[in-house]
């Protein structure tokens, strides 16, 4: 049963990665996140199994040939094709609930396409966006540069950068680019939505992607530990309805199991934005218990979002 749940979660992660991808992704890129284990051949076998599961569920995964990072050959990459959902046969209450859920968080900019309508969701009255996760304008040129093994220029933290992306990937609902920062003279990882202004072409790259590099080792396994500052220990309560997710994802960080099924975690946090993103995934099913300054910071953040939505 546990193995089946692991495979299901991995298939969902694979589908989410393909849905976010702006360009075809290689086998190495698609199997770099947690869930795929073992050497390259084992990961390939796991991916082929997951691909068959998704195709059997009606998800069209197409194959394309793209230049290898070295640029001297072509490799296979994968991209989502047109996928159609069957009629979900929802009743009125279910359609309203789906509509409210889809409108709680807005992803990207308003382009006139309503995914909720396609699923049969009803439009509930007086529902405001709880948060918006904007699409990053820099994503497409950054991904194109990675594909072409080229360099780009952009501003980040008010500093101009010349950067050669080796990998573009998602982690905890954010897009990142890892590669060689020419000005810094070392590899760096940047969050794409924090890039200031346009990403412009800077000619061919001069620092090839190192042997063995992957998006899986480009940054810490836990995005909460990104950055170089001093980490704090956050104590978080997750209620019984969602405790199962924590048991699967962070079993080593559970410090208390309560009689009602709720669990308490202790998390090392260095990257506050990543922590808030993780916390928001539980909506009102998680509560920051300590330290007081982090709890106050989260309360202020939620209050600001609600005021902006009202």
Image: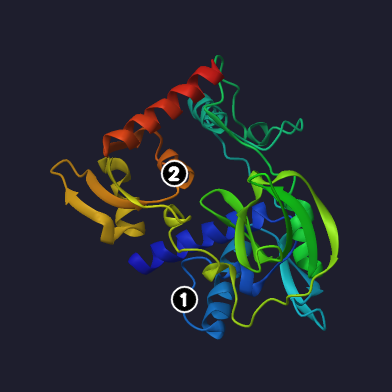
Task: Give the Cα separation between the discs numbered 2 and 1.
Answer: 29 Å
Q: Circle 1 is placed at which residue position?
A: 37
Q: Please state the horizontal and vertical placement of residue 246, each as a whole percent of the image.
A: 32, 52
Residue, x 39% and y 40% (percent of image)? 282
Specify which label sits upstream in the sequence, 2 or 1.
1
- The quarter holding residue 286 reads top left
Against 179, residue 256 (above or below) is above
Q: Is residue 81 visible?
A: no
Q: Please state the horizontal and vertical placement of residue 141, each as a whole percent of the image.
A: 79, 54
The answer to whether 106 appears left or right of 110 in the picture is left
Q: Please state the horizontal and vertical placement of residue 168, each as a whole percent of the image.
A: 66, 61
- The quarter holding residue 149 reads bottom right
Q: Please state the horizontal and vertical placement of residue 301, each as a whole percent of the image.
A: 45, 29
The answer to whether 108 appears left or right of 277 in the picture is right
Q: Which of these two is toward me, 240 or 210?
A: 210
The answer to whether 259 appears left or right of 154 in the picture is left
Q: Are marks 2 and 1 in contact (CB under 8 Å)?
A: no
Q: Quadrant of the C terminus?
A: top right
Against 58, residue 2 (above or below) is below
Q: How is the image coloured?
A: rainbow
Q: Secondary structure at mark 1?
A: loop
Against 290, residue 154 (above or below) is below
Residue, x 32% and y 44% (percent of image)? 242
Other residues around mark 2 within 10 Å, as few (<14) / some (14–19) / many (≥20):
some
Other residues around mark 1 within 10 Å, as few (<14) / some (14–19) / many (≥20):
some
Q: Secondary structure at mark 2?
A: helix
Q: Circle 2 is placed at which residue position?
A: 272
Numbered circles on residues, count: 2
Against 193, residue 66 (above or below) is below
Q: Which of these two is toward me, 118 or 181?
A: 181
């Amino acid at each position: 049963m546990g193995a089946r749940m692991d495979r299901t979660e991995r298939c969902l992660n694979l589908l989410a990665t393909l849905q976010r991808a702006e360009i075809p992704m290689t086998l190495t890129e698609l199997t770099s996140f947690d869930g795929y284990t073992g050497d390259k051949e084992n990961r390939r076998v796991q991916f082929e199994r997951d691909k068959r599961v998704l195709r059997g569920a009606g998800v069209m995964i197409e194959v394309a040939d793209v230049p290898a990072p070295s640029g001297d050959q072509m490799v296979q990459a994968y991209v989502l094709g047109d996928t159609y959902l069957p009629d979900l046969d929802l009743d009125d209450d279910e359609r309203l609930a789906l509509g409210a859920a889809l409108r709680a968080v807005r992803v990207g900019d308003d382009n006139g396409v309503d995914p909720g309508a396609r699923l049969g969701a009803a439009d509930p009255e007086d529902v405001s966006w709880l948060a918006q996760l904007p699409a990053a304008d820099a994503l497409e040129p950054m991904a194109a540069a990675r594909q072409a093994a080229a360099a780009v220029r952009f501003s980040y933290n008010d500093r101009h950068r010349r950067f050669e992306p080796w990998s573009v990937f998602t982690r905890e609902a954010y897009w990142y680019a890892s590669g060689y920062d020419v000005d810094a003279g070392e590899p760096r990882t940047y969050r794409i939505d924090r890039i200031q202004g346009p990403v412009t072409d800077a000619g061919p790259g001069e620092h090839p992607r190192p042997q063995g590099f992957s998006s899986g080792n480009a940054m810490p396994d836990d995005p909460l530990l990104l950055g170089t500052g001093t980490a704090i220990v956050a104590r978080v309560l997750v209620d019984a309805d969602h405790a199962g997710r924590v048991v699967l994802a962070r079993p080593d960080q559970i410090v208390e199991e309560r009689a009602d099924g709720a669990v308490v975690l202790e998390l090392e946090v260095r990257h506050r934005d990543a922590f808030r993103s993780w916390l928001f995934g539980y909506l009102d099913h998680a509560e920051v218990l300590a330290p007081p300054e982090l709890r106050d910071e989260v309360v202020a953040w939620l209050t600001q979002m609600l005021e902006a939505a009202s």
